[in-house]
């Protein structure tokens, strides 16, 4: 990676040049011959992705353009179900891309399962019961008969009361 560029301010002190992140990435890619040759292809694929989103917005929430060479467009889908739905829309997509100036002769679909990101566990916010409600539930628990049918209710009330007493 290229070191950050510095500019001299009027006072002669070095200050770091601030630029947009994408501009920095573009500069980095242009600095290397092999990477610079990828820029036009990357731009073409990004533009094609945008065009596909405009034609089929619902489908391209999960689909991506993988490659476009020699008139053959390769699209990636996360699973076979989406691939099947997309396959039904291919004539519409191809016609619209042709109208927009893209020379698309064929469209291939590849299923590319993505790694599912683990969902972070976010505890559900618990409602704080007023003291009156907690005491009413305690009274209810104590007033229940010790019958076999009331055991589950008595245990549930006990857990609820313990939780609300610990919060205070």
Image (spheres, rainbow, N blue to C red):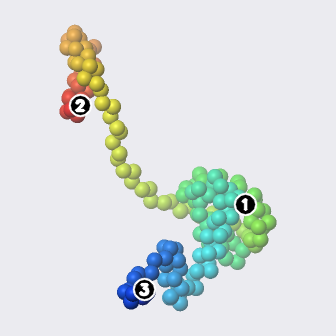
Element marked by disc 3: loop
Which disc, if any, is residue 9? 3
Label 2 or label 1, whichever lies nearer to me, is 2
**Dot 2 crowding, Cα within 10 Å, few <14, some 14–19, many 20+:** few
Residue 151 in the image: x percent, y percent?
A: 24, 18
Nearer to the camera, 85 or 102: 102
Q: Residue furthest right?
A: 99
Say which quarter of the image contains residue 90: bottom right
Q: CA distance from mark 3 to mark 2?
A: 61 Å
First reached walking from the N terminus: tag 3 or tag 2: 3
Q: Give the left or right position of residue 25, taking residue 154 as reference.
A: right
Is residue 81 visible from the viewing direction of this image? Answer: yes
Residue furthest out toward the front:
11
Frontmost residue, 150 versus 142: 142
Near-viewer residue (54 or 72): 54
Q: Is residue 23 above or below residue 106?
A: below
Q: Is residue 10 left or right of residue 103?
A: left
Q: Give the image location of residue 144, x and y in percent.
A: 23, 11
Residue at point 35% right, 47% down?
Answer: 121
Q: Which residue is mark 2?
A: 163
From the image, tell me which residue sits under label 1. Answer: 93
């Amino acid at each position: 990676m290229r070191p950050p560029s510095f500019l001299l301010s009027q006072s002669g002190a070095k200050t770091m040049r601030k630029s947009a992140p994408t501009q920095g990435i573009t500069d980095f890619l242009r600095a290397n011959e092999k990477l610079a040759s990828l820029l036009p292809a990357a731009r073409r694929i990004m533009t094609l992705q945008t065009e596909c989103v405009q034609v089929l917005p619902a489908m391209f929430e999960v689909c991506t353009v993988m490659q476009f060479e020699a008139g053959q467009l390769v699209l990636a889908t996360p699973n076979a179900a989406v691939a099947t739905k997309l396959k039904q829309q291919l004539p519409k997509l191809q016609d619209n891309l042709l109208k927009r100036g893209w020379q698309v002769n064929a469209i291939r679909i590849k299923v590319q399962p993505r790694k599912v990101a683990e969902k972070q566990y976010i505890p559900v916010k618990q409602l704080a019961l007023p003291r009156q409600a907690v005491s009413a539930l305690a009274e209810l628990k104590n007033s229940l008969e010790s019958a076999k049918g009331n055991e589950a209710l008595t245990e549930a009330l006990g857990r609820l009361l313990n939780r609300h007493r610990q919060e205070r």
